[in-house]
Amino acid sequence: MDEKTRLTGAVHGMSGSPLYIDGKLVGALSRRLGGFEKDGHCGFTPIEDMLDVGKRKAADDDINPFPWPAGKARMSRLSGQGMSGYLALPLSISGWNERLRELLEPLFPSDGLLVPVAGGANGHAGGVEGAPIAPGAPLAVVLMSGDIDVAGTGTVTAVDGDAVLAFGHPLLGVGAVDFPFAQAEIISTLPSYQYPHKISNTGRLVGTLRQDRLSAVAGDLGKLPSLAAYEIELTHNGERRPSLRGRMVKDYRLAPSLVLMLAASALDGGQDYSFNSTLRMKGEIAFDGLPPVRLDGIYSGRGRARSQALIDVVMPVLELYAQFPRQLNLAKVKLSVQSYEKDSVWRVESVSVDRERVKPGGEVRIIARLKNDLGELAVKEFKVRLDRHLKDGEVTISVASGADLQRQKMYGAMWFDAQTPEQVIRALAPEFRNDALYMQVVTYGTGVNRPDQRQAELPPSVAQIDQGNPLTREQIGRVKKIWRQQEMALSGVVSGSVENRIKIE
């Protein structure tokens, strides 16, 4: 044992280091027993258990009564020290702003086996070769590669032809997987009582991880898995910044978290970050055989712009994966973000109408008053002629921001028990602008309240029939019918809504 290992003991990143007795491979280093012991002790996984993982086939996971909870913004809840002190895998992230660590903390629970550390270089562009895959050599499981690189590094236990065994414990513990793995280069070992770990560079992709089980991970050298592409275009104050491009794993259990990381990287801005900001974001998230999830919005405010934009990117993805995880084959994530170091936010303060009673087909004048963060007042006027079919009743004049209306649409889609992914994608499609004010003349009645099929004012007999249909029983209720709608663009993001009621007589 070298002097540095005597000092550090078993560190995170050594998982999988082979144990030989009398020249025979008997197991792999997998545990660090205790956290602050002066005389380090460690545990090993028997080689028989690891060999069993290598014999598993992908079909073993075709029937899974406990599927991974897709749609949750996390990577792993497997216990680290809580699971008999498993050594964790340092998750090296390069091309990633350190400011994002706090924002993305939910992705890396303190009891998990993936712990983010300072990232080194990545060799996917040919810069780092890394050590050949052999017993005792480092192995990096790559979740994202390119300008943003995410890889968890451990150690190879055994190689038999093209078959590789490593780690002596799970990566995520989810069974059959299709993750690329790469060579790696260990730069140094960081001694620490709290989290001693290896610091590494990620080398070129050389194979595919097939199994992620309790006792080991197993894979094959050679053929690489199919990966999704990502592309991020950035512009700040009209100046083009370098684009970010690369590839990422498609696995439905990780895709939502990786999309969150990409969106956060695009929206944070790095050196261009400003507390007062306006962001214009466009893009799409594409899946094989499905229409893309379109993204289009403008966001502004002191510290609020990025968080709201992040929600609008991630929520549709989470909802899709929550309802149809195995039907989604991610193809590409493309984002375009324009940022400006200024903000402009208008809040709807009040709305008034020029009359409380009107005849069928009559005209109504609506005055909306808005105020910005500087206290400036803006007055906007709408004129609308009511539909002649509106008679002897009450109508609602609603003045609302596009952001509020789009958010209502998004949350309505979240409660929608869709039958196909296409229904969710249509229900979440952008319809209202964040930088616009909308006036709507609406009535409410009993109807079908599905995001992909809204039908108001059903006859009582039809409503009763629909109540007996299990597909619509929970979606019959108070439904808004829009008779007239007008849009007015503003020089800034709008928030808030106000309703007024008038009588038709």
Image (spheres, rainbow, N blue to C red):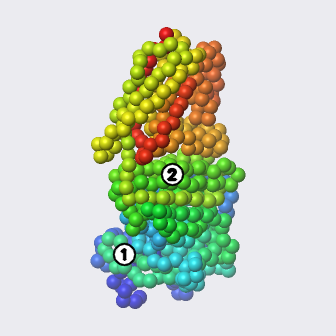
Q: Provide the residue designation for mark 2.
A: 313
- The residue tagged with tag 1: helix, strand or loop? loop
| Residue 292 image position (x, y, % from top left) | 63, 51
Q: Residues within 10 Å of mark 1 (few under 14, many from 20)?
A: some
Give the amino acid type for the residue marked by disc 1 in the picture: Pro
Q: Provide the residue designation for mark 1.
A: 196
| Residue 88 image position (x, y, % from top left) | 44, 69
Mark closer to the observer (1, 2): 2
| Residue 371 image position (x, y, % from top left) | 34, 40
140 on left or right of 354? right
- What is the total number of numbered labels drawn onto the structure image? 2
| CA gap, disc 1 and disc 2 | 36 Å
Residue 115 in which image quadrant: bottom left
Most extreme residue toward the right is: 289
289 on left or right of 176? right
Vertical relation: 465 (above or below) 283:
above
| Residue 384 image position (x, y, % from top left) | 51, 25
Q: Nearer the viewer, residue 502 or 3?
A: 502
Residue 86 in which image quadrant: bottom left
- The residue tagged with tag 2: helix, strand or loop? helix
Give the amino acid type for the residue marked by disc 2 in the picture: Val
Q: Are marks 1 and 2 in contact (CB under 8 Å)?
A: no
Q: Nearer the viewer, residue 184 or 29?
A: 184
Q: Residues within 10 Å of mark 2 (few under 14, many from 20)?
A: many
Which residue sits at x=66%, y=65%?
226
Most extreme residue toward the bottom is: 2
Residue 192 in which image quadrant: bottom left
| Quadrant for the N terminus in the image | bottom left
469 on left or right of 271? right
Vertical relation: 71 (above or below) 446:
below
Which residue sits at x=38%, y=46%?
345
